[in-house]
Image (spheres, rainbow, N blue to C red):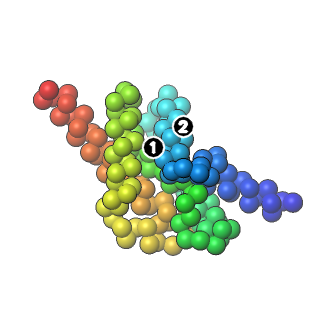
Amino acid sequence: MKSDFKRRTILFLSTAFGSGYSPVAPGTAGLAVGVFLYLGLSHFSWVWIVLCTVITFFIGVWVSAQTEKFVQQEDPGCVVIDEVVGQWIALFLVPLTTFNVVLAFILFRFFDIVKPFRRAEKLPNGWGIMLDDVIAGIFANATLQIIIFVLENYS
């Protein structure tokens, strides 16, 4: 009984509240959850956002590794907690206008697909699952910050 509860809790977290089970584009569904959660987090100071992101990252490493064991598959598509954390990074310290949120979403998706540091996803025990999306989030955020700067200063 206790083991089943633990397993379901791990799957609930690794799939971002079940969004990773979406029959169409589970990664995109996880990103949407990430956006909505970030919009809630954005009401707190940047320190709390960083703290929540770091904690969720480490939880993500653990639940991702556990989910890999449960489903006996490397980097299963249902695991989308990495998309949540990556999207939070993509949105960090960005003015939350509709344009910026949509662009952060698109840029994160782009860098998640392109995978600038492909070697990161080869790391074991959930680290690879989480780190490749952290890197995509960093690239998306940096690109978005440059776009915002250019638009604000040169348009």
Instruction: State the quadrant of the N terminus.
Output: bottom right
Q: Secondary structure at mark 1?
A: helix
Evaluate if marks 1 and 2 touch, with contact meaning CB atoms under 8 Å apart: yes
- Coordinates of residue 103 in the picture (x, y in percent): 34, 38
Instruction: State the quadrant of the C terminus.
Output: top left
In this rendering, would 146 be left or right of 101? left
Dot 2 crowding, Cα within 10 Å, few <14, some 14–19, many 20+: some
In this rendering, would 97 be left or right of 4? left
In this rendering, would 10 be left or right of 50? right
Dot 1 crowding, Cα within 10 Å, few <14, some 14–19, many 20+: many
Residue at x-position 64% and y-position 72%: 72
- Tell me the CA gap for discs 1 and 2: 8 Å
Residue at x-position 45% and y-position 43%: 88
Q: Is residue 123 above or below residue 22?
A: below
Which residue of the protein is positioned furthest toward the front in this rendering? Answer: 24
- Coordinates of residue 125 in the picture (x, y in percent): 55, 70
Residue 37 tag number = 2
Give the amino acid at mark 2: Leu
Residue that numbered label 1 is attached to: 88
- Coordinates of residue 106 in the picture (x, y in percent): 36, 43
Residue 41 shows up from this direction = no
Which residue of the protein is positioned furthest toward the left in this rendering? Answer: 154
Residue 48 tag number = none
Give the amino acid at mark 1: Trp
- Coordinates of residue 115 in the picture (x, y in percent): 35, 61
Which residue of the protein is positioned furthest toward the right in this rendering? Answer: 1
Which residue is nearer to you in this view: 59 or 32? Answer: 32
